[in-house]
Image (cartoon, rainbow, N blue to C red):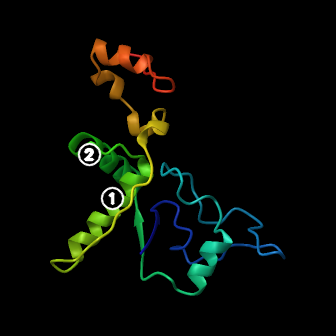
Protein backbone atom coordinates (compact mmCIF):
# COMPACT_ATOMS: atom_id res chain seq x y z
CA UNK A 1 0.00 0.00 0.00
CA UNK A 2 1.24 3.45 -0.88
CA UNK A 3 -0.40 6.52 0.58
CA UNK A 4 0.00 10.24 0.08
CA UNK A 5 -1.86 13.46 0.96
CA UNK A 6 -5.15 13.74 -0.91
CA UNK A 7 -4.39 17.28 -2.08
CA UNK A 8 -0.77 16.50 -3.10
CA UNK A 9 -1.03 13.24 -5.02
CA UNK A 10 2.26 13.08 -6.84
CA UNK A 11 2.09 9.34 -7.55
CA UNK A 12 -1.69 9.24 -7.87
CA UNK A 13 -1.66 12.07 -10.41
CA UNK A 14 0.16 9.90 -12.96
CA UNK A 15 2.25 12.94 -13.92
CA UNK A 16 5.98 12.21 -14.32
CA UNK A 17 8.65 13.84 -12.18
CA UNK A 18 10.95 16.09 -14.21
CA UNK A 19 14.52 14.86 -13.69
CA UNK A 20 18.00 16.09 -14.47
CA UNK A 21 20.73 14.09 -16.21
CA UNK A 22 21.79 12.50 -12.92
CA UNK A 23 18.20 11.37 -12.17
CA UNK A 24 17.68 13.89 -9.38
CA UNK A 25 14.42 15.88 -9.44
CA UNK A 26 14.91 18.95 -11.63
CA UNK A 27 11.78 20.81 -10.52
CA UNK A 28 8.88 20.74 -8.14
CA UNK A 29 6.33 18.08 -9.12
CA UNK A 30 3.36 19.63 -10.97
CA UNK A 31 0.82 17.93 -8.67
CA UNK A 32 2.38 19.18 -5.43
CA UNK A 33 0.36 21.42 -3.13
CA UNK A 34 1.14 22.38 0.48
CA UNK A 35 -0.41 19.96 2.97
CA UNK A 36 -0.37 19.47 6.77
CA UNK A 37 1.11 15.94 6.82
CA UNK A 38 4.68 16.84 7.77
CA UNK A 39 7.20 14.19 6.80
CA UNK A 40 5.09 13.02 3.86
CA UNK A 41 5.34 14.04 0.25
CA UNK A 42 7.90 16.74 -0.39
CA UNK A 43 7.43 18.66 -3.63
CA UNK A 44 9.22 15.98 -5.69
CA UNK A 45 9.39 12.21 -6.14
CA UNK A 46 12.77 10.99 -4.82
CA UNK A 47 14.70 8.38 -6.82
CA UNK A 48 14.08 5.64 -4.25
CA UNK A 49 10.33 6.14 -4.58
CA UNK A 50 10.59 6.36 -8.37
CA UNK A 51 12.22 2.93 -8.37
CA UNK A 52 9.36 1.52 -6.28
CA UNK A 53 6.83 3.10 -8.67
CA UNK A 54 8.62 1.80 -11.77
CA UNK A 55 8.84 -1.75 -10.37
CA UNK A 56 5.27 -1.66 -8.96
CA UNK A 57 6.36 -2.47 -5.41
CA UNK A 58 2.91 -1.44 -4.18
CA UNK A 59 -0.61 -2.69 -4.82
CA UNK A 60 -2.60 0.49 -4.53
CA UNK A 61 -2.28 4.24 -3.93
CA UNK A 62 -4.58 5.41 -1.16
CA UNK A 63 -4.82 9.18 -0.60
CA UNK A 64 -5.69 10.60 2.82
CA UNK A 65 -6.83 14.12 3.66
CA UNK A 66 -4.73 16.11 6.13
CA UNK A 67 -7.72 16.92 8.40
CA UNK A 68 -8.42 13.18 8.67
CA UNK A 69 -4.85 12.62 9.87
CA UNK A 70 -5.24 15.40 12.43
CA UNK A 71 -8.52 13.91 13.64
CA UNK A 72 -6.98 10.48 14.19
CA UNK A 73 -3.78 11.84 15.81
CA UNK A 74 -6.00 13.62 18.35
CA UNK A 75 -8.16 10.52 18.85
CA UNK A 76 -5.08 8.33 19.42
CA UNK A 77 -3.83 10.75 22.08
CA UNK A 78 -7.19 11.18 23.82
CA UNK A 79 -8.42 7.59 23.67
CA UNK A 80 -5.25 5.47 23.65
CA UNK A 81 -2.54 7.70 25.12
CA UNK A 82 -0.54 7.40 21.89
CA UNK A 83 1.10 10.76 21.22
CA UNK A 84 1.92 10.92 17.52
CA UNK A 85 2.12 13.54 14.83
CA UNK A 86 -0.13 14.24 11.88
CA UNK A 87 1.67 11.66 9.73
CA UNK A 88 1.06 9.05 12.44
CA UNK A 89 -2.61 9.97 12.55
CA UNK A 90 -2.74 9.75 8.76
CA UNK A 91 -1.03 6.35 8.77
CA UNK A 92 -3.55 5.12 11.35
CA UNK A 93 -6.46 6.52 9.32
CA UNK A 94 -5.28 4.59 6.26
CA UNK A 95 -4.84 1.42 8.35
CA UNK A 96 -8.44 1.80 9.56
CA UNK A 97 -9.64 2.11 5.97
CA UNK A 98 -7.71 -1.03 5.02
CA UNK A 99 -9.12 -2.87 8.05
CA UNK A 100 -12.63 -1.90 6.99
CA UNK A 101 -12.28 -3.79 3.72
CA UNK A 102 -10.02 -6.66 4.84
CA UNK A 103 -11.27 -10.19 5.50
CA UNK A 104 -12.02 -11.12 9.12
CA UNK A 105 -8.88 -12.28 10.91
CA UNK A 106 -6.51 -10.20 8.80
CA UNK A 107 -3.40 -8.86 10.49
CA UNK A 108 -2.61 -5.21 9.74
CA UNK A 109 0.62 -3.59 10.90
CA UNK A 110 0.50 0.16 11.41
CA UNK A 111 3.76 1.74 12.58
CA UNK A 112 3.75 5.19 14.20
CA UNK A 113 7.46 5.95 14.72
CA UNK A 114 7.00 9.59 15.73
CA UNK A 115 6.05 11.61 18.76
CA UNK A 116 3.58 14.46 18.83
CA UNK A 117 5.66 16.87 20.89
CA UNK A 118 7.42 18.36 17.86
CA UNK A 119 4.02 19.43 16.45
CA UNK A 120 2.90 21.71 19.28
CA UNK A 121 2.81 24.75 16.96
CA UNK A 122 0.98 23.01 14.09
CA UNK A 123 -2.75 22.67 13.33
CA UNK A 124 -2.68 19.43 15.35
CA UNK A 125 -2.90 21.51 18.52
CA UNK A 126 -5.07 24.41 17.34
CA UNK A 127 -7.39 25.45 20.13
CA UNK A 128 -5.98 23.11 22.77
CA UNK A 129 -4.99 25.97 25.07
CA UNK A 130 -8.67 26.93 25.34
CA UNK A 131 -9.29 23.60 27.07
CA UNK A 132 -6.41 23.88 29.57
CA UNK A 133 -6.89 24.76 33.22
CA UNK A 134 -4.41 26.96 35.16
CA UNK A 135 -2.38 23.97 36.40
CA UNK A 136 -2.01 22.59 32.87
CA UNK A 137 -0.95 25.99 31.51
CA UNK A 138 1.70 26.29 34.25
CA UNK A 139 2.97 22.80 33.46
CA UNK A 140 3.09 23.54 29.71
CA UNK A 141 5.16 26.67 30.35
CA UNK A 142 7.68 24.65 32.38
CA UNK A 143 8.34 22.33 29.43
CA UNK A 144 10.71 23.80 26.79
CA UNK A 145 9.12 23.94 23.36
CA UNK A 146 5.63 23.18 24.70
CA UNK A 147 4.36 26.62 25.72
CA UNK A 148 0.75 27.58 25.09
CA UNK A 149 -0.62 31.01 25.80
CA UNK A 150 -4.09 31.04 27.29
Is 108 displayed left or right of 50 in the figure? left
Can you tell which mark lies on residue 75? 2
Is 19 displayed left or right of 42 in the figure? right
Considering every residue shown, the one lying at the far right of the view is: 21
Whole-percent x and y of residue 101?
A: 23, 76
| Residue located at (37% from left, 18% from top) | 139
| Residue located at (60% from left, 73% from top) | 49
In the picture, residue 14 is in which quadrant? bottom right
Is 27 displayed left or right of 12 in the figure? right
Is 145 displayed left or right of 27 in the figure? left
Can you tell which mark lies on residue 92? 1
Q: Quadrant of the C terminus?
A: top left
**Element on which disc 2 rests:** helix
In the picture, residue 105 is in which quadrant? bottom left
Can you tell which mark lies on residue 140? none
Q: Quadrant of the N terminus?
A: bottom left
Q: Residues within 10 Å of mark 2 (few under 14, many from 20)?
A: some
Whole-percent x and y of residue 93?
A: 32, 59
In the picture, residue 100 is in which quadrant? bottom left
Residue 75 vertical placement versus 103 (above, below): above
| Residue located at (45% from left, 33% from top) | 120
Whole-percent x and y of residue 54?
A: 60, 85
Residue 133 vertical placement versus 103 (above, below): above
Residue 88 vertical placement versus 129 (above, below): below
Residue 148 vertical placement versus 75 (above, below): above
Q: Residues within 10 Å of mark 1 (few under 14, many from 20)?
A: many
Whole-percent x and y of residue 124?
A: 40, 40
| Residue located at (39% from left, 46% from top) | 84
Considering every residue shown, the one lying at the far bottom of the view is: 55
Work out how far the residue at label 1 is from the one at label 2, CA to CA, in angstroms: 10 Å
**Element on which disc 1 rests:** helix
Q: Earlier in the sequence, mark 1 or mark 2?
A: 2
Amino acid sequence: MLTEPANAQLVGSGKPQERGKNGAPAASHPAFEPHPIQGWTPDFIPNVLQEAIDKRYYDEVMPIAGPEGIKWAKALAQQEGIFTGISGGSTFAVARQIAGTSPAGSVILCMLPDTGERYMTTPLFDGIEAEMDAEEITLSRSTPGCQFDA
